[in-house]
Amino acid sequence: MAGQIIRRGDKTWLVRIFLGRDELGDRRYLNKTIRGAKKDAEKYLNATLTAISTGTFVQQSAVSLNRFLDDWLASAAKPRVSERTFAEYAALLRRYVREPLGKITLSDLRALQIQSLYSQMQERGLSSRIVRYTHAVLSSALKQAVR
């Protein structure tokens, strides 16, 4: 990975990191404007390069969980499961997941929020089977999001 720091003004720096090429062969970059001292830009560059090399870097995504679940149901779940199972997945997600978590962007979604959802489901008196089934479907979708 290569990165550079470009001066953009008084105490403003552009940190640019080469991420590789996309499927069309075009170069992909991560650009981030840092306001402050050059040392702050260097810290961001080093931290980001370390996260990329260790595999812990997550690029920000503006896609909400609702939007991703729509895409996941249509492209990943529908072709590989029966019509009835697909309908159950969609109903389960609509009933229990979309309202409390649907507006959160994928990059802002945290494990604690999901665990809180499961706890709320149990407090409402839902069976542990429903909670486990919800977890299985949501987990499958989020594993696809990570890939």
Image (cartoon, rainbow, N blue to C red):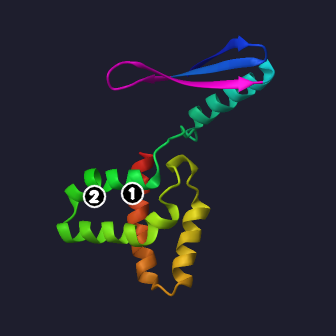
- Alpha-carbon neighbours of circle 1 within 10 Å: few (<14), some, or many (≥20)? some
Determine whether, in the image, residue 144 is placed left or right of residue 120: left
> Residue 130 at x, y = what percent?
41, 79
Q: Position of residue 137 (x, y in %)?
A: 38, 65
| Mark closest to the chain's N terminus, 1 or 2 | 2
Q: Residue at x 50, y 56 (%)?
A: 103
Q: Is residue 63 left or right of residue 114?
A: left
Q: Tell me the magenta residue range.
A: 19-35
Q: Amino acid at mark 1?
A: Ala
Rendered image quadrant of residue 52: top right
In magenta stretch: residue 32? yes
Q: Secondary structure at mark 2?
A: helix
Residue at disc 1, secondary structure: helix
Per the picture, the main secondary structure of the magenta-coloured stretch is strand
The residue at 38%/25% (across/down) is 22
Q: Identify the residue at horizontal 75%, vertical 24% (top origin).
A: 35
At x 40%, y 72%, the residue is 95
Q: Relative to 139, does residue 131 appear above or below in the rendering? A: below
- What residue would you read off at disc 1? 141
- Whole-number angstrom distance, CA of label 1 to CA of label 2: 9 Å
Q: Residue 117: horizontal and vertical position, in percent?
A: 54, 70
- Residue that mark 2 sits on: 77
In this orientation, which residue lies closer to the viewer: 96 or 4?
96
Along the horizontal axis of the image, is 139 left or right of 51? left
Please say whether residue 23 is one of the residues in the magenta stretch. Answer: yes
Q: Residues within 10 Å of mark 2 (few under 14, many from 20)?
A: many
Do residues under tags 1 and 2 come within 8 Å of each other at their CB atoms? Answer: yes
Amino acid type at image mark 2: Ala
Nearest the eye: 99 or 92: 99
Against 138, is 21 above or below?
above
Image quadrant occupied by the N terminus: top right
Q: Position of residue 147 (x, y in %)?
A: 41, 45
